[in-house]
Amino acid sequence: MTQITNNYFELLSLPLCFDIDRQELDKAYRSLQQVSHPDRFVNESAQRQREAVQQTALNIEAYQALKSLVQRACHLMTLLGHEFDLGSYTVSDVALLMEQMEYREQLSDIKDNNELEELDAFAKKIKSLSQDMTAKISKQFKHLQQINSLDNTRFDSSSLKNLICELQFLTKLALDLDEVEEQLMLIQ
């Protein structure tokens, strides 16, 4: 029963690619959970129960990682031979850093001035930027996978890493936008 693997795509029987069907991911996860859920092993040995708990934890970890575009991208980078620890990666693109600061200031101004309509327009802009960023990352991964089949050393991963960092920023900003929206709705 225990299927310990570091490849979440393999665990969930999904193709090794950035673009995955969310419904297929959900279906694969539910299927795995049905087979390995600890409740199915209550009459088994303590060892089997422990294995079921471990497998369930791994299934959840894999599902959460592949559900998140940023985590999926980081995991795929590693599987394709380009180690990437997002937490310790430093973005050196000054323009990107300045843009992030401007977006944060804009969100702060919207919140301070209770501008719900401005917030809606800003949220649409961030959503559009996130979709564009996701498309760029997808394109880069397709290119990387083509190169990997030929020669892994020819790919400069710094551009892809910067795109993933930018997507992470936009994802966090979108969460903050939702939080500000909730706060402004309470005030209205």
Image (cartoon, rainbow, N blue to C red):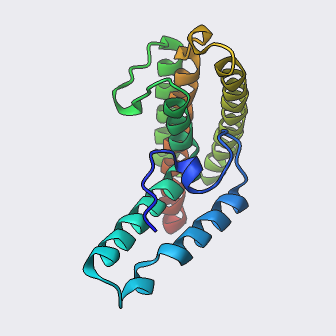
Q: Is residue 84 visible?
A: yes
Q: Quadrant of residue 164?
A: top right
Q: Position of residue 154 (x, y in %)?
A: 61, 8
Q: Position of residue 117 (x, y in %)?
A: 66, 51
Q: Residue furthest bottom?
A: 43
Q: Is residue 79 left or right of residue 146?
A: left
Count up the numbered dots: 0
* Front residue of 170 and 87: 87
Q: Residue furthest left?
A: 46
Quadrant position of the C terminus in the picture: bottom right
* Front residue of 185 and 56: 56
Q: Is residue 41 left or right of residue 170?
A: left
Q: Position of residue 68 (x, y in %)?
A: 55, 49
> Which residue is depicted at the point 70% across and 32% down?
138
> Which residue is depicted at the point 41% across and 65% down?
55
Q: Is residue 157 left or right of residue 13?
A: left
* Front residue of 79 and 70: 79
Q: Position of residue 116 (x, y in %)?
A: 61, 53
> Which residue is depicted at the point 56% across and 68% down?
32
Against 117, is 141 above or below? above
Q: Is residue 173 visible?
A: no
* Front residue of 163 and 110: 163
> Which residue is depicted at the point 49% across and 19% down?
98
